[in-house]
Image (cartoon, rainbow, N blue to C red):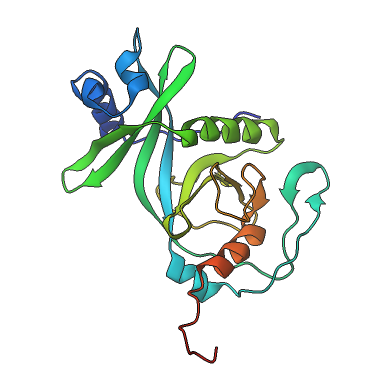
Amino acid sequence: MPLHVSQAPTPALHSVLAALGSPAVREASTPALRSVQGPLTAEVPLPVHVLDVLDVLDVLDVPDVPDVPDVPGVPGVAAPAPGPAGTPRTRLVGWRFLIRGGQLSLAAADTLPTPGGWSFSHFFEGPYIASTERALRQAEAVQSSWQPRLLSVPELYMLTLWLHGDTEADPAGGAPDGADVLIPLAPAPPGIAAHRPQRVADLLPRLAVRLVPPPLLGSTA
C-alpha cells in the first residue's frame, strides 16, 4: 500500500537543491555523488525525530519482556506486550532526503532548523541509505496506511523507520503511538534485529532496558 510521505518544508527542500547545484557536491565526502554522471534529485523527504530518553524511562516500566509471537495477518510485526504503553516524547531535529541519480539512491542529505529557517547540513552515504530503502519497501508491502518518519535513539546508536498510523498528522509533532510500527535499520544495536518490524508498545520497553544506566561500582543496586 502506498506510504503517505509528508511534504518537507519548502526552505528545507530548496536548501538541498541549492547544495546539489553547488561545489558542496564535489567537496562532500560522498564519492558516489562526486562521480555520478547526470542529474541528481532529492526525493522521499523524511522527518527525523529523536526519542526523549529521560521521558522513556519516566513513562515506561522496564520489565523483562519475553519474546512474543507475530500478529496474525501481519507478518513480522510482533504482538503488543501486555499492559498499556507509555507515550514518550520526541523532538524534530531535521529532514532527510534520499539523493538519487537515475533509479539509484546514492546518498542522503540532511537539513537542520536554524534561527533563519531550514538550511542544508551535509551529504552522507553508508549502510543506512540502502537500509532505509529496504524498510520503506517493507512498509509498502503491509496492508496498512502509514506516515513514514525516522526515529533516532542516539544513546543506542540506533535509527528506525517510524511508521505513524495517523497519516494526516503534522510530521513535525506527535509522540509514538503504541500501535505505530518501528523498523530498526541496519546496523542495529546488539540484541535488536534489523528489519524486524515491531509495534512501539513492544519495542520501547526493550529499548528502555538498554537505556537504564548500569549501577555504580560498589552500589548495592
Q: Is residue 203 above or below residue 19?
A: below
With 203 as the anchor, is 70 left or right in this view? Answer: right
| Residue under the image location 46 percent in, 70 percent down | 55
Residue 185 sits in quarter: top right
Q: Is residue 53 above or below residue 107?
A: below
With 16 as the anchor, is 68 left or right in this view? Answer: right
| Residue under the image location 74 percent in, 68 percent down | 82
Q: Is residue 19 above or below residue 11?
A: above
Q: Can residue 4 be seen?
A: no
Residue 86 x, y percent position in the rendering: 58, 68
| Residue under the image location 61 percent in, 28 percent down | 2
Residue 36 sits in quarter: top left
Residue 21 x, y percent position in the rendering: 23, 18
Residue 28 x, y percent position in the rendering: 26, 27
Residue 3 sits in quarter: top right
Q: Can residue 46 be seen?
A: yes
Residue 208 x, y percent position in the rendering: 56, 67
Could you say which is closer to the camera, residue 10 or residue 101?
101
Q: Residue furthest bottom?
A: 220
Q: Residue furthest top?
A: 38
Report the quarter where the C terminus lies: bottom right
With 97 as the anchor, is 64 left or right in this view? Answer: right
Q: Residue furthest right?
A: 72
| Residue under the image location 55 percent in, 53 percent down | 189
